[in-house]
Image (spheres, rainbow, N blue to C red):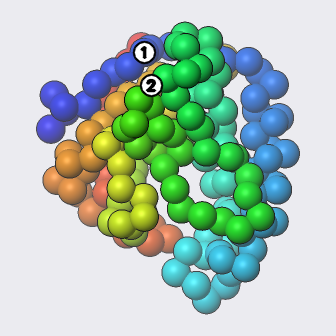
Amino acid sequence: MMNSIKILKKNVPYPKMLKELAKEIGAMRTLFSQHRYKKGTQGWRGDDESRIQQLGIMGELIARDYCYNNFDSNEFKFEPLIEKDVIALPDLTWNDKKIDIKAVDEKTFEFRMNCNSYNNSNKKVKGYWFVKLRPNCTANHFIVPYNVISDWEVKEGYTPYFAAPMPIIK
């Protein structure tokens, strides 16, 4: 299983200001998704909603920074970070391949993929781009093929999720 996980790039620096930008955009995304993720619904994450939104935005911003600094922008297209109505679409289209971006905070050392999102027919993807946050505004980037994830262990969180250990990179 781990052989199919590709390390895209190790210890990639990103601009420090992305942290502040992620907080601001995450707050807006939380506001716009209040009707969807409210108490009593399956997706409700309580007081963690804003933090989780910020983490997701951080991953997307870092991936955008990496792409715009390393590739021709005609090769890829990102979906908007904020929309008034939350629509579950893949975050990135790269040469006609749909890719979803997932962020992993500094204290977590496993890949995590929400089971409902994974099985969402509107969000079918070729793979996932995991952005692992590291100290000093650096990140590791991993590509995980879609078909690998269903073999991962299923754990319980706010909702069930697939989990697999992340390679330790120094």
Amino acid type for the residue under numbered disc 1: Lys
- Numbered badge on residue 108: none
- Quadrant containing the N terminus in the rendered view: top left
| Residue 111 shows in this picture | no
Position of residue 93 in the picture relative to residue 64 (left or right) = left
Amino acid type for the residue under numbered disc 2: His
Identify the element where label 2 is drawn.
Answer: strand
Residue 117, image x, y percentages: 42, 63
Position of residue 152 in the picture relative to residue 142 (left or right) = left
Q: Nearer the viewer, residue 91 or 134?
A: 91
Q: Which residue: 27% across, 47% down?
A: 146
Position of residue 168 in the picture relative to residue 91 (left or right) = left
Q: Nearer the viewer, residue 93 or 18?
A: 93
Residue 97, image x, y percentages: 37, 38
Q: Nearer the viewer, residue 28 or 89?
A: 89
- Quadrant containing the C terminus in the rendered view: top left
Q: Which residue is mark 2?
A: 141
Tell me if residue 139 comes above or below residue 34 in the rendering: above
Quadrant assignment, res 57: top right
Q: Are marks 1 and 2 in contact (CB under 8 Å)?
A: yes
Q: Which residue: 75% across, 74% down?
A: 34
Residue 44, image x, y percentages: 61, 76
Query: CA separation, marks 1 and 2?
Result: 5 Å
| Residue 10 shows in this picture | yes
Q: Which residue is mark 1?
A: 9
